[in-house]
Amino acid sequence: MTDIEPNVPAWQGWCKKSESGKLDYVEEKVDATGAPGRSVLLGEDKSMNGHGKQKKGKKIMRLFSLAFHHFDDDMARRVLKDAVETGDGFCIFELQARNFLSFIMVSLLWPLAIVILAPIYFYNSPGRLVFTYLVPCVPFVWVFDGYISCLRTRTPAEVRTLMREAVGEDKLRDWIIRSGQETHTVPIGKLRWFMATKDDR
């Protein structure tokens, strides 16, 4: 696991709980536009922490979970270029899209979730409870942020275009690209995914 703001204590716990033993992390900050070399990411370097089992055939899969829409087009191209040139695959997961149903989901489900979850997470913070229920700043900010996320989320075709612009069509000939969606909250909540993997055949 890598991140530009690594959460090492949480990662240590996840590595200990990993049944496969293949989960590992890099303690230093990692920028997705310039990830460290394969030796670091595959655990062959001392920068890794030794939690993962050293096995031949390990591959690098990058995961952008509810994150890719935060990159502007220029940064997205640089991230994709680095992923294609130094990795074996990547996945993009988003819970929203640039469509009417996503705006409905953000408008209805997020405030409901806040109202239900606020007492659980903010029970020891009277200020947060005030700004959730009495002066509903927190729900407003969450919904506004959700709308912006909907507007910034790219379609699979747009991600493919960014990939072509980043590395050229020739470098993508050995890549298998798939995309789809799964329902997470009936009837309108959809998880959208985009997956690109290098074809080793």
Image (cartoon, grey):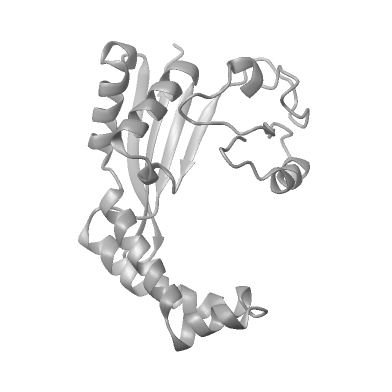
Which quadrant of the view contains residue 193?
Answer: top left
Q: Is residue 142 left or right of residue 24?
A: left
Q: For the view shown, which residue lies furthest in the bottom direction?
A: 134
Q: Does residue 61 lie above or below 127 as drawn?
A: above
Q: Does residue 93 lie above or below 135 as drawn?
A: above
Q: What x and y, as percent, mark residue 184?
A: 42, 59
Q: Residue at x 78, y 27 (%)?
A: 50
Between residue 168 and residue 195, name the one nearer to us. Answer: 168
Q: What x and y, as percent, mark residue 133?
A: 47, 86
Q: Is residue 29 visible?
A: yes
Q: Residue at x 29, y 49 (%)?
A: 152
Q: What x and y, as percent, mark residue 41?
A: 62, 23
Q: Say how many tags the image has.
A: 0
Which quadrant of the view contains residue 59?
Answer: top right
Between residue 49 and residue 19, name the one nearer to us. Answer: 49
Q: Does residue 90 lie above or below 166 as drawn?
A: below
Q: For the view shown, which residue lies furthest in the front direction?
A: 127
Quarter of the image with the N terminus in it: top right
Q: Does residue 46 lie above or below 16 as drawn?
A: above
Q: Residue at x 33, y 67 (%)?
A: 105
Q: Is residue 198 visible?
A: no
Quarter of the image with the C terminus in it: top left
Q: What x and y, as percent, mark residue 78?
A: 38, 26
Q: Residue at x 76, y 30 (%)?
A: 49
Q: Is residue 189 left or right of residue 21?
A: left
Q: Is residue 96 left or right of residue 22?
A: left
